[in-house]
Image (cartoon, rainbow, N blue to C red):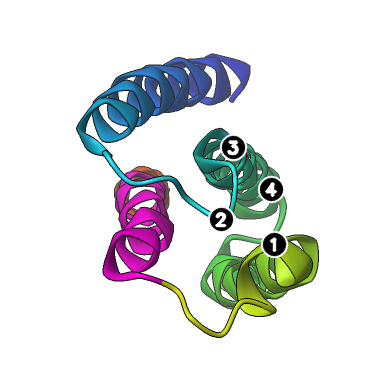
């Protein structure tokens, strides 16, 4: 269990470093929020969700799917609370800013979903 969490943490760290570097390199416009904070939030949230899923899948394997669903809602809700002032108070987000919010979400959500699916299929 600890080994799988550490491997996942390493993969998330690499995904964070590579994707943030590439994304930051290709953005030419200034954003109304800090891009690294969005990436960091999604990386930490993915790590927390996976760690929780490891614990739940070993203790209550039949409830793991429901737990994952609840954790997804919590993750998105906390994102809205944390970034409310810097992102959601701005009515005029540019197309670049919209993509800068969606790209990290889908990158880390995909990595997290693949890892959780692999975990649940192994149980």
Range drawn in magenta: 94-112
Q: Which residue is drawn at 47% across and 50% down?
A: 31
Q: Which of marks 2 and 1 is nearer the N terminus?
A: 2
Numbered-mark total: 4
Spatial separation of the CA atoms under disc 4 and disc 2: 32 Å
Say whether marks 2 and 3 touch (CB < 8 Å): no
Ranked by sequence position, the earlier of labels 4 and 2 is 2
Q: Is residue 39 magenta?
A: no
Q: Could you give the CA–CA distance between mark 1 and mark 3, rounded to whole angstroms?
A: 24 Å
Residue 55 picture quarter = top right
Q: Name the residue under label 2.
A: 32
Give how far apart the Cα atoms at labels 2 and 1 are. Answer: 7 Å
Q: Which of 103 and 87 is in front in this view?
A: 87
Task: Measure the alpha-carbon separation of dots 4 and 3.
Answer: 9 Å
Mark with earlier residue (1, 4): 4
1 and 4 marks in contact (CB < 8 Å):
no
Q: How packed is label 1: few (under 14 Cα within 10 Å), some, or many (20 or more)?
A: few
56 is higher (above) or lower (below) than 25 = below
Residue 78 appears in view: no
Q: Which of 103 and 4 is in front in this view?
A: 103
Front residue of 30 and 59 = 30
Which label sits on residue 86? Answer: 1
- The first of marks 2 and 3 along the sequence is 2
Q: Is mark 1 on a helix, strand or loop?
A: helix
Question: Which numbered circle lies on residue 47?
Answer: 3
Q: Earlier in the sequence, mark 4 or mark 3?
A: 3
Residue at 45% of width from left, 15% of height from top? Answer: 10
Q: Residues within 10 Å of mark 3 (few under 14, many from 20)?
A: many
Q: Do the residues labelled 4 and 2 touch (CB within 8 Å)?
A: no
* Tag nearer the camera, 1 or 4: 1
**Circle 4 SS class:** helix
Can you tell which mark lies on residue 67?
none
């Amino acid at each position: 269990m600890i080994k799988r969490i550490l491997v996942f943490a390493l993969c998330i760290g690499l995904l964070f470093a590579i994707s943030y570097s590439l994304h930051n390199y290709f953005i030419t416009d200034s954003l109304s929020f800090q891009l690294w904070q969005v990436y960091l939030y999604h990386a930490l949230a993915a790590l927390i969700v996976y760690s929780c899923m490891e614990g739940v899948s070993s203790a209550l394997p039949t409830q793991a799917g429901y737990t994952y669903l609840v954790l997804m809602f919590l993750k998105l809700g906390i994102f809205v609370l944390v970034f409310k002032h810097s992102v959601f108070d701005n009515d005029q987000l540019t197309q670049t800013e919209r993509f800068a919010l969606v790209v990290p979400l889908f990158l880390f959500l995909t990595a997290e979903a693949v890892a959780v699916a692999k975990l649940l299929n192994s149980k």
